[in-house]
Image (cartoon, rainbow, N blue to C red):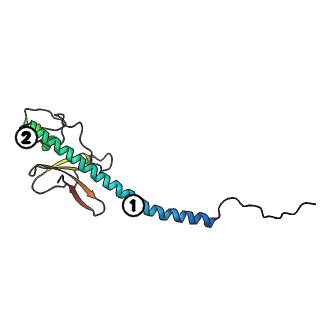
Amino acid sequence: MPTPRLHKPRRSGFSLVEILIVVFILGILSAMVIPQFSSATSESQQRNIQAQLQSLNNTIELYKSQRRGAFPNFAADGWGTQADTTDPTTRTLIGLRYIKEAPRHPRYPTGDANATAVQVVTGTVRGHATAAWVWNSTARELCASYFAETSATMTYTATD
């Protein structure tokens, strides 16, 4: 005669309700944490842009001091590969080896040609609709322009 079982057989695993509670809690936690990471990324990009601008403007000042007050001619060739030191219309930062390559703006998508584009402007303009970098020939200042997704407007970052 078989012996009667006194205990119920043990179930292994989790019930559907337990799994749903865990998924719900993870959803709440991720909703709170993910915006903080994206904010930190944005702040990091902003600091990167400011550091690049400071470095580039220092490079431009070095160029100016070594070239008797002349500024790079961004209109001729952008960051440029031309290196004719006798022709003032071809003064460029890459061609004269002040920088190795055109700086990439971190807020532009990888592979976007505008991420390294420089546009020459005058007056009080400090941003551009497509170019990542803006050389204001009136103020003799390099700025970084970008499209702000949150406000859907063009903004700029100056070195001020």
Q: Residue furthest front?
A: 6
Total numbered labels: 2
Secondary element under disc 2, as helix, strand or loop, is: loop
Q: Secondary structure at mark 1?
A: helix
Residue 55: horizontal and vertical position, in percent? 21, 44
Location of residue 18 with respect to 144 vertically, above or below: below
Quarter occupied by the C terminus: bottom left
Say which residue label 1 marks.
35
- Image location (x, y in percent) of residue 107: 29, 52
| In-image side of 94 versus 2 (left or right) | left
- Can you say whether 114 is above or below 63 in the image? below
Name the residue at 23% across, 53% down.
130
The three-letter amino acid code for the residue at tag 1 is Pro
Mark nearer the viewer, 2 or 1: 1
- Provide the residue span drawn in magenta: 1-15
Task: Residue 70: give its label.
Answer: 2
Q: Position of residue 68 (x, y in %)?
A: 5, 38
